[in-house]
Amino acid sequence: MRIIVCKGKRAQGEAAAALFAAQILRKADCVLGLATGSTPLETYAALTAMYERGALDFGAVRSFNLDEYVGMKPDQEQSYFRFMYENLFSKVNIPQGNYFLPDGAAADVDAECARYEAAIEAAGGIDLQFLGLGHDGHIGFNEPADHFPLATHCVDLAEQTIEANKRFFASAEDVPRRALTMGIGTIMKARGIVLVVNGADKADITAKVLKGPVVPQVPASILQFHPNVTVILDEAAASKL
Ligand code: GLP
């Protein structure tokens, strides 16, 4: 595990973007694992700037996102599909049909989870996965549990997660209670992982994730066992290491 401590979110975004850019430059038709939330915004902005300058070509890139809310249609304002479209897909030349999210509006969520997992496999697996970190140690929407879920599945969101994500909705009551997420096993199969964490409010959980015991109650702690993880922190998130 490589740990990089940056001065501020913009520098974190530049560092993460450099790793994703290197991946795309090495393998034009690579498969990226992408994330939503506030954390990836600077990374997506830096990748967009590189694309605009002609330094990056997304024409053959494929991507799979970590998760989507259950019941959410792609065109709904708070859907993760819409977030990705507005912050990355519409800004670079990734072809429509090359980017995928779990279908939160699927009638049969279990069938959708199996289909999504199989689609990742069929694409050859994920070359480089972006991860943010939830306050309770979740990655994707893999909440603290008594086991590490293997594959894409449907989860009940923890109260803390609903609280943290209500800022994107009119009120906490409007936050969906369930989500489809890649499993811990799906994430661990990625050939490379970039974990980005910022802010003093995540200093305690960052220390547990990186230095504490590997337990499913702290889902991201499993990353200690992955052979190719780069952790990009700001000084505040690194302050309890
Ligand atoms: C959400 C997402 C995660 C994300 C986490 C942190 O619950 N499902 O993928 O990493 O929150 O979000 P943020 O980056 O906004 O702090």
Image (tube, rainbow, N blue to C red):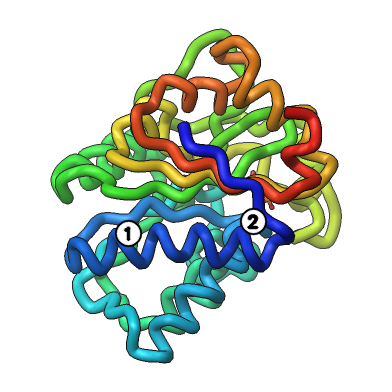
Residue where numbered disc 1 is placed: 63
The amino acid on which the numbered mark 2 sits, given as a three-letter code, is Thr
Residue at (62% x, 25% y) in the render: 209
- Classify residue 38 as left or right of residue 167: left
Q: Nearer the viewer, residue 181 or 211?
A: 211
Mark 1 or 2, closer to the camera: 2
> Where's residue 47, x and y in %?
46, 74
Q: Is residue 166 visible?
A: yes
Q: Is residue 95 visible?
A: no
Question: For mark 2, does the 10 Å Cα neighbourhood hold few (<14), some (14 to 19), or many (20 or more) residues?
Answer: many
Residue at (36% x, 30% y) in the render: 188
Q: Is mark 2 within 8 Å of ligand 1?
A: yes
Q: Is mark 1 within 8 Å of ligand 1?
A: no
The amino acid on which the numbered mark 1 sits, given as a three-letter code, is Ser
- Classify residue 135 as left or right of residue 87: right
> Where's residue 238, x and y in %?
73, 38
Question: For mark 1, does the 10 Å Cα neighbourhood hold few (<14), some (14 to 19), or many (20 or more) residues?
Answer: many
> Where's residue 12, x and y in %?
61, 59
Residue where numbered disc 2 is placed: 39
Q: Could you tell me which quadrant the C terminus lies in? A: top right
Q: Nearer the viewer, residue 42 or 227?
A: 227
- Which of the two discs, 1 and 2, labels the residue nearer the N terminus? 2
